[in-house]
Amino acid sequence: MIKRILLTGSFGQIGSDLTCALRKIYGGENVIATDLSTKVTDKIKNGGPFEQLDVLDGKKLAELIDKYQVDGIFHLAAILSAVGEKNPALAWNINMQGTINVYNVAKEKGIKRIFTPSSMAAFGPTTPFDMTPQDTVLQPNTMYGITKVAGELLGKYYIEKYGMDIRGVRYPGIISNETLPGGGTTDYAVQIYYDAIKYGKYTCFLKEDSMLPMMYMPDCLNATIGLFQADKSRLKHNTDFNIAGFSVTPAEVAASIKKYIPGFEIEYAPDFRQAIADSWPNSIDDSCARAEWDWKPSFDLDATTRDMLAVLGEKHKQGLF
Ligand code: NAD
Ligand code: AKB
């Protein structure tokens, strides 16, 4: 049983929600939020410990593990696809050096379990686009995707060579309303809701028919915590589980928003992120995750839209954006 958890990158889109979800399960004092940034929100600061940590600093990570008697890690700190294409050297350094630092320190300190996310970005233009299988071609053409494939393989290496317990899922694009995304290709599917409420219109950086797999945050949290707590004896895969929510195009997201905001307008101005989106799957086969740890999503597009608009509508009324 894992008792004390440390998260890296805990101020990010996923980390800010995951930190709170884990604190509800494990207790606030037992979930240590860390990030390179020191811009800690009240929610994270008041809910439990926070420490500034650069994942490139293995010595400090080791000190924090000792200080808090950590036995589980969620390693979320990373550079995402769009920022990574603008600065490939940064993406390689943070995503690869950061991850191997975490694994080396975790090995030395006897950490019992680590969760490190992969991404659908591990796939590329030579992978089957429809119902992309679990075990398939992994030849991404983005630096971010290359670090995700290498991260999956690095985890497997530490599992096989050192007997560590490292788990991960290939997230699709995550839609959420707590923290804006940090520079990915699927970010449009979050920003569109903010702009629909604030301006009644949105200019999309992908084409209207650009189909991508997406998932709402509550399902993302269930998948993440579900795999972390899964019975190891049932798992045939480890660092690379496909998971899927629903597949949508920008035009379909706009149509879903229009059901609730009839005057909503969308324009399209595709930029460099279109090429990244074009290399990723249309839809994903997540049958291994379903069979090995009972993964099942709950939210479709319309359920996501209803909840996003309700939560963001309230935040807008309170002047939060
Ligand atoms: P994000 O960009 O929102 O957050 C990343 C966090 O890492 C930020 O708070 C940033 O300050 C921090 N960080 C950056 N460099 C750091 C460093 N050197 N040391 C410590 N912290 C550092 O990312 P996210 O969307 O929350 O993604 C979390 C993980 O999930 C990543 O591995 C990402 O690749 C993966 N993922 C996310 C999505 C998605 O749609 N959000 C999809 C697929 C995979
Ligand atoms: C991105 O767009 O870079 C991320 C991802 C799918 O990995 N959201």
Image (cartoon, rainbow, N blue to C red):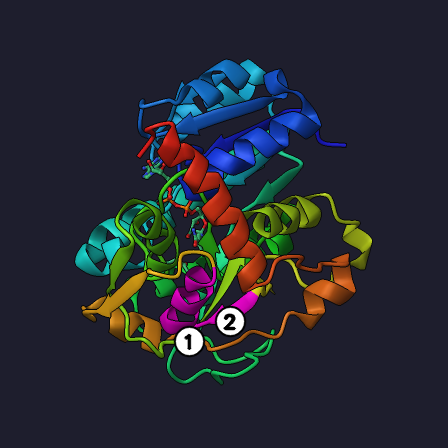
Q: Is residue 127 left or right of residue 69?
A: left
The residue nearer to you, when weighing 7 against 130, is 130
Q: Is residue 189 left or right of residue 102?
A: left
Above or below: residue 290 compared with residue 161 = below
The image's mark for residue 54 is: none
Residue drawn at (64%, 58%) of the image:
238
Q: Does the CB distance between marks 1 and 2 fall below 8 Å? A: yes
Residues rendered magenta in the picture: 246-259
- Relative vertical location of residue 176 with respect to residue 263 in this rendering, above or below: above
Q: Quadrant of the N terminus?
A: top right
The amino acid type, in three-letter code, at marker 1 is: Met
For disc 1, the neighbor class at 10 Å (few under 14, some 14 to 19, many from 20) is many
N-term mark: 1 or 2: 1
Q: Residue at 47% across / 66% down in the picture? A: 120
Residue 294 to residue 227: above or below: below
Asked whether mark 2 and ligand 2 are closer than 8 Å, the reply comes as no
Taking the image as shown, residue 27 lies to the left or right of residue 309, namely: right
- Three-letter code for the amino acid on which mark 2 is drawn: Ser
Task: Report the quarter where the C terminus lies.
Answer: top left
Res 88 seen here: yes
| Location of residue 232 in the rendering, given as x and y in whole percent from the top left corner | 77, 51
Residue 250 placement, left or right of 88:
right
- The label number, if any, that marks residue 211 in the structure image: 1
The residue that label 2 is drawn on is 247
Residue 250 within the magenta-colored segment of the rendering? yes
Secondary structure mostly taken by the magenta-highlighted segment of the chain: helix
